[in-house]
Image: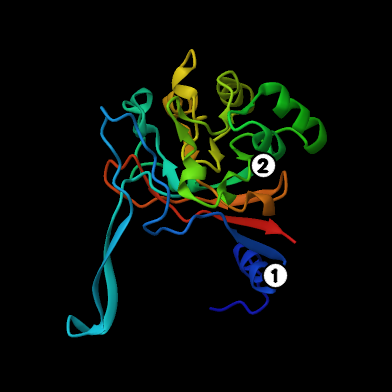
Amino acid sequence: MHNENKKPTQLLELVTAITRGNIKVIDLTMTLDRKVPTIVLPPELGQSWPFRMEEISKYNEKGPATYWNNFSCGEHTGTHFDAPIHWISGKDLPNNSTDTIEPEKFIAHACVVDCCREAEKNPDYLLTIDDVCSWEKTYGKIPPRSWLLMRTDWSMKKTPEEYLNLDDEGAHTPGPHEELIPWLIDERDVIGFGCEDVGTDAGQASNFKTPMPCHHLMHGRGRFGLPALTNLDKLPAQGTVIITPPLKIRQGSGSPVRVLALIEE
């Protein structure tokens, strides 16, 4: 029997708050099209497909009532989710692929560290432990199982060439210092690391003592990555909830994802 006096549930209150605009939904996602920057690896390695789309029909002789398309791309194209199985250090972990990760882990709190001035001055800027500790003195300690999102405004670059920023030495893009990653895992128990450039590691991270430390250490400890985010300038330093479910690909190492952020107005 219906109980007319039953109080609204927390979920209903959440939906009502979104409908009324008390909680705002921010899209943190790149638009997928043929211009979206795709990571470039050394030529001797395998390469990711760029995004391609082919029309199946558009209300025409191929389908009078339908508009739809085929598309193809690598799993790690545009704004995407990195699962632990993506890196060799996470290949033997349980529940390490996009189809087996516990779904509750796709909803989590996020902290946003603003590094845009530093990244503008130095494209190879590295976020350090001292930087994060200084941020915590102002905004509070990172809660366990939060995302650490590195804001650089890198997503505002106007062309793929500026965004990838390649030269003979490779890419020059900002990222986390190699000492920061184990600290974030062991001292702050983060669920993952996100950023605005094409990968979660800095452009020159293959030259670090531990090459590609964000990939190697985060995924080796069952944590996640969120590269190529946008609109981080619209988020508060603390208090955001982000929703990050990748496509449920069997043994998927990742997938493009539409990342949504919930913030209180």
The spot of residue 21 in percent (x, y) is 70, 70
Disc 2 residue type (three-letter): Val
Q: Position of residue 113 (x, y in %)?
A: 68, 38
Residue 233 falls left or right of residue 94: right
**Residue hosting label 2:** 112
Question: Which residue is rendered at x = 56% and y = 24% of the image?
Answer: 181
Q: On the image, which quarter does residue 123 sit in?
A: top right
Residue visible at 64% across and 79% down in the picture: 4
In this view, the mark in front (1 or 2): 2
- Which label number is shown at residue 73? none
Q: Residue 260 in the image: state x and y as whole percent.
A: 55, 56
Q: Is mark 1 on a helix, strand or loop?
A: loop
Nearer the observer, 9 or 101? 101
Q: In this view, does 85 lie to the left or right of 10?
A: left
Q: Which of marks 1 and 2 is nearer the N terminus?
A: 1
> What residue does disc 1 label?
21
